[in-house]
Amino acid sequence: MGSIVAFVNMKGGVGKTTTTINLAACLAKDYNKRVLIVDLDSQINATLSLMSPVQFAKLKKDHKTLRNLVKQSVSKQTKPRWAPTEIIQTNLCGINGLDILPGDIELYEDFVLADIIYERSQGKRDNFLECWQEMEDNLLKQILRPLAPMYDFVLLDFSPGDHLMTRSGILASDYYVIPAKPEPLSVVGIGILQGRIKQFKDNQRSTIELLGITFTSLGRTTKMAGQVQERLERDFGKTSLFRTAIPINVAIARAVDFYKPVVLTEPKSTGAKAYKRLANEFLYRWQQHIKVPDSPKPEAES
Ligand SMILES: Nc1ncnc2c1ncn2[C@@H]1O[C@H](COP(=O)(O)OP(=O)(O)OP(=O)(O)O)[C@@H](O)[C@H]1O
Ligand SMILES: [Mg+2]
C-alpha cells in the first residue's frame, strides 16, 4: 500500500510545488519508486511544471483532469464515466514511474459543493455541518485511496490557504511535509496548519503524521533564519526540521520554462543536489515512520 503524503503550508509561495515535483522525480528516477503527483491547486503549477500548456489544453479538452474525478466523487454517480487510470498521465519527462493526476483551473466551485451539501442536509443547519464534514472526510479519500496500492507514494501538491479541498487532502493523507521559507511569517502559516491538524486528530478524523519541515529558498545564513529555526524546533521538536535545506538557486526557477524539474534540467546545480539529498532524507524519515528495519541512514550533507 503506497503512502499518501501532503506537501502543505497555509502560506503561499513557500516552495510546495517545487518540492513536490522535484522529490517525486528523484524518488522515481533515483530510487525506482512508483510516484503519483496529484495537483490539488487550481493554479495548476505542478501540472505546468511537468507538461507544456499545449499538452495541458489537450487534456482539459478531453476532460482528462482531476476536475472530472472530483465531479464524479461529489455526485456519487453509480456508474462513473471516468476511471482515474484513464486520466493519469504516465512516465512524465521520460521517467519511468513518474505519473500525475493533472490539475484543473476549474477544479471545483465552492458554490457547487455548498449547493450539493445543502441539498443533502435537507435545509437543516445541524445536518449541513454534518454533511459538510462528510464531504471533507471523503471527497479526496474516495479518489485517492483506491490509487494508493498502485504506487509507492502519492504526493499531493496543495494550494495555499485553508479550503475545503485542502482539508479534504489532509484528511486523505498518511503523512505530511511542510515546505517553509526561513521567515517569521512561515511560523504563522505552520501554526495555523498545525492547529487545523490537531483539530482533526482530536476529533479522530485523521492520524496524519509529520515527516518534517523543510526550509526552501535558504539564502545566506542570517540571524532571522536562525531565530525561525530555533522557534520551530522549540514548537515542533528538535528533529522536526529536515537536515537538508534547499538553497536559493536560479536553476530551480529556470527549470519551469522547460516543463521539467531542476533535477533533470540542471542536475549539477546546487538546487538539484539539495533536492536529491532531500529525497534521500525523506525516504529515511518515511522508513522510520513505517518502521522498516535496517533503513539506510541519509547521506551526509556535502
Ligand atoms: N530554491 C529556490 N530558488 C529559487 N527559486 C525558487 C526556489 N524554490 C522555488 N522557487 C521559485 O519560487 C516560486 C514559488 O515556488 P513554488 O511555486 O514552489 O511555491 P508554492 O508554495 O507552491 O506557491 P503557491 O502557494 O502559490 O502554490 C516559483 O516561481 C519557483 O520557481
Ligand atoms: Mg504551488
Image (cartoon, rainbow, N blue to C red):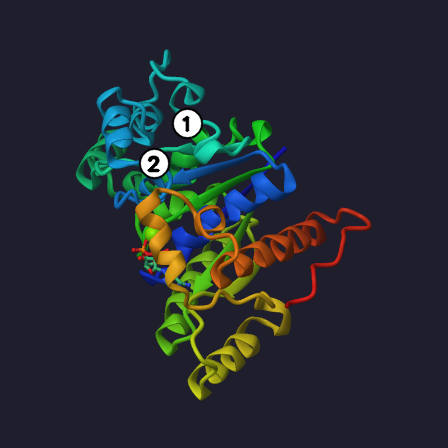
Task: Say what amino acid the circle numbered 1 marks.
Answer: Gln
**Toward which corner of the image does residue 274 lie, by quadrant?**
bottom right
Residue 51, numbered circle: 2
Q: Is residue 72 left or right of residue 281?
A: left
Residue 32, numbered circle: none
Q: In this view, does 42 lie to the left or right of 253?
A: left
Viewer-proximal residue among 69 and 227: 227
Quadrant, the N terminus: top right
Q: Position of residue 13 (x, y in %)?
A: 32, 61
Q: Which element type, helix, strand or loop, lies under badge 2?
A: loop
- Identity of the residue drawn at 41% across and 36% down: 140
Q: Position of residue 97 (x, y in %)?
A: 55, 31
| Residue at numbered disc 1 | 89
Quadrant, the C terminus: bottom right
Q: Is residue 174 left or right of residue 178?
A: right
Q: Where is residue 289 in the image (x, y as percent from the top left)?
A: 68, 52
Task: Say what amino acid the circle numbered 2 marks.
Answer: Met
